[in-house]
Amino acid sequence: MLRVASCAALLLLLRKALGLPWFQSVGAVLVFYLGSGGWRFLKIFYKTIGRDAWGALTLLRVKFQVKKHLREKNTIPVIFKECVKRHPNKTALIFEGTGATWTFRELDEFSNAVANFLHAEGYRSGDVIGLFMENCNEYVGFWLGMAKIGVEAALINFNLRLDALEHCFSVSNSKAVIFGKEMSQAMLDVHSLMGKSVRLYCLGECDLKTVPLGTEFLNYLLQSASRLPPKDPGREFTDKLFYIYTSGTTGLPKAAIVVHSRYFRMAALVYYGFGMHSDDVVYDCLPLYHSAGNIVGVGQCLLNGLTIVIKKKFSASRFWDDCAKYNCTIVQYIGEICRYLLNQPVREAESQHRVRMAIGNGLRPAIWKEFTSRFRIPQIAEFYGATECNCSLGNFDNHVGSCGFNSRILPFVYPIRLMKVNEDTMELIRSPQGLCISCKPGEPGQLVGRIIQSDPLRRFDGYVNESATNKKIARNVFKQGDMAYLTGDVLVMDELGYMYFRDRTGDTFRWKGENVSTTEVEGTLSRLLGQADVVVYGVEVPGTEGRAGMAAIADPSGNCDLEKFGRDLRKTLPVYAHPVFLRILPEVNKTGTYKFQKTDMRKEGFNPYLLKDSLYVLDSQKGRYIPLNEDVYNRIQQGKLKL
Ligand SMILES: *[C@@H]1O[C@H](CO)[C@@H](O)[C@H](O)[C@H]1NC(C)=O
Ligand SMILES: *[C@@H]1O[C@H](CO)[C@@H](O)[C@H](O)[C@H]1NC(C)=O
Ligand SMILES: *[C@@H]1O[C@H](CO)[C@@H](O)[C@H](O)[C@H]1NC(C)=O
Ligand SMILES: *[C@@H]1O[C@H](CO)[C@@H](O)[C@H](O)[C@H]1NC(C)=O
Ligand SMILES: *[C@@H]1O[C@H](CO)[C@@H](O)[C@H](O)[C@H]1NC(C)=O
Ligand SMILES: *[C@@H]1O[C@H](CO)[C@@H](O)[C@H](O)[C@H]1NC(C)=O
């Protein structure tokens, strides 16, 4: 900025004071500019102007459409209706599990039936209904049907059980729960914890004895419901569509609000930014209770008329066969998936598909090139963006290893920035004026996004829990009196403005593609061990993605029963949340404010050469903990022991 200003001043000086002709003045200024380091800027300009222009065009297109929908008070169901009108007989959804193929008209009619049925049952605009089932076509039909009468779905992680499950129903104020028959046992278990007024509906045929008393059966009820469009509930683009739960840093899952405009914006940014077409076929093997599966994937069907192949669950061995069978052109991934695919033996289908793009989140730079060359995927569409945050980034130009960019030419157009943090405490570092300090290229910093509530592209709709919302917001960040959203993620930017993921901050780590909340695991483990002090953190293991869970357990008496602990664990926590490593020590150090000193332990890791405490590792084959001696440690380091 300074350089440009001094160039302008120099130009004025040369022209006015010395009366030099234009070409001489400009020439002199150019020499001054390049000499003062402007050469580097010109190089950056030349290398990134195309990318930036594309990004700007994408933002403008989405912004323009959001404005239009706001003006016309459209909603996701209204936009979907346009798709149905355009091509009623085109395939909308294919469920790989049963081969069920639904056209746009069929999806429309199913969701009408859902809407009419629920309306007749007394549910009205603003009510919340929990949706608890595995991936299937009906899943989409249910929440879409609810949206048609203004009822909001709470999309619940089907891995949850007992307390965490009940928490999700209750924080969203669900008046009813629609569950798949595969969730019957979980519903039986949680039923006694739930409010008595919550009504239960089951999808699928099953024995009366295997579901909670009073459950009604939808297969039969929906058949008699009208398939005509329900009456418009008068909802708008800024109204709530559904809730998605994020496993945040504060223990139990938090319900994040997704409004119609946010759903639209996320799906549209991906569609335009990555250059999707309406004849693309998307392979979606991610859970539909998450934004990646339900917005980035399914959104392309509802808003842009793409065909989506829904897979019940990711399968590394079936992946390419499915893609070939259904002529998929786009696949979705999360970081782990790519590694699992690379670990598979070479098979024929992996080179006989038509996939031209892989879109997702968390592909490691280390396996990026191997992934694209082995499976012959021309484009990796890596993006960054939490459900509840508006600071999305996208790698629009297939730049290896990066999860997006910010313009170096006009950085202020998109109000995101990397801010310096104390990497241990993750607190923002402030200047003497009290503002945050932007990072220079190469310096890691926390990604923050400025909050401008009046702009629907920049809105932050927050969590259901207000105090959780406030925790994610910092004040006086860019300038005095402003607000910014804290992503809690540390990224680093290069000279050209490409961003790279650095680390997850704080108390959540990622393992097997799932976010593990250490607070939650700590709570559960502590309960299983008679309220012992337990500290959980993620440790890096060579050759694996994310961080493996490690639990430091205080056992002053030294009689911890690991056999029983292992058995109890399997009953209470999803597999990805089981600690891979245990460190049994007499006492866990605490700070003056009774906080565990996690940072040091995380640094110490699971190295038996350094630590004197007893260490154990979870043998995934046998499903129990075995002592972690130096031999086992070496095998882990060499990638010979599967975790
Ligand atoms: C869709 O299919 C139905 C019958 O299956 C047919 O009556 C209708 O004309 C078709 N619509 C279009 C737009 O092709
Ligand atoms: C995939 O494409 C082939 C060739 O174009 C076609 O024969 C086949 O029916 C398609 N499969 C599906 C599931 O659409
Ligand atoms: C992030 O969300 C806040 C909350 O509304 C918003 O004001 C801010 O502008 C957003 N930032 C970005 C980069 O989208
Ligand atoms: C809301 O969040 C805060 C901290 O994030 C937590 O202490 C509180 O228990 C939460 N309230 C509910 C109702 O979940
Ligand atoms: C994990 O957290 C990240 C960042 O908050 C989010 O983008 C992602 O969707 C989460 N994934 C799961 C499986 O919860
Ligand atoms: C606990 O604190 C003491 C004294 O600061 C230190 O020597 C010891 O290594 C710490 N223990 C652990 C497990 O970090």
Image (cartoon, rainbow, N blue to C red):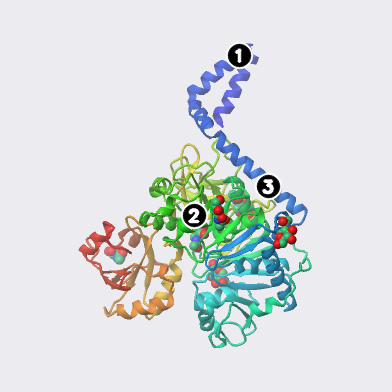
Measuring from the top left, give residue 505's x and y in whole percent.
Answer: 45, 57
Mark 3 vs mark 1, foreground winner is 3
Amino acid under label 3?
Answer: Lys
Q: The residue tagged with tag 3: helix, strand or loop? A: helix
Q: Which mark is residue 63?
A: 3
Mark 3 vs mark 2, foreground winner is 2
Q: Quadrant of the C terminus?
A: bottom left
Measuring from the top left, give residue 573's x and y in whole percent.
Answer: 43, 74
Determine the CA span between mark 3 and mark 2.
36 Å
Residue beneath the point at 60% across and 72% down: 131
Query: CB of residue at label 2: within 8 Å of ligand 2?
Result: no
Determine the CA span between mark 3 and mark 1.
41 Å
Determine the CA span between mark 2 and mark 1.
61 Å
Q: Quadrant of residue 599?
A: bottom left
* Contact, mark 3 vs mark 2 (Cβ under 8 Å): no
- Which of the four quarters of the rendered structure image does ligand 6 lie in? bottom left
Residue beneath the point at 56% across and 60% down: 309
Where does label 1 land, which residue? 23
Q: Is residue 575 left or right of residue 329?
A: left
Would residue 621 be visible to someone looking at this image?
Answer: yes
Amino acid under label 1?
Answer: Phe
Measuring from the top left, give residue 227's x and y in whole percent.
Answer: 74, 70
Q: The residue tagged with tag 2: helix, strand or loop? A: helix
Mark 3 neighbour density, 10 Å: few (under 14) some (14–19) many (20 or more): some
Where does label 2 land, which residue? 324
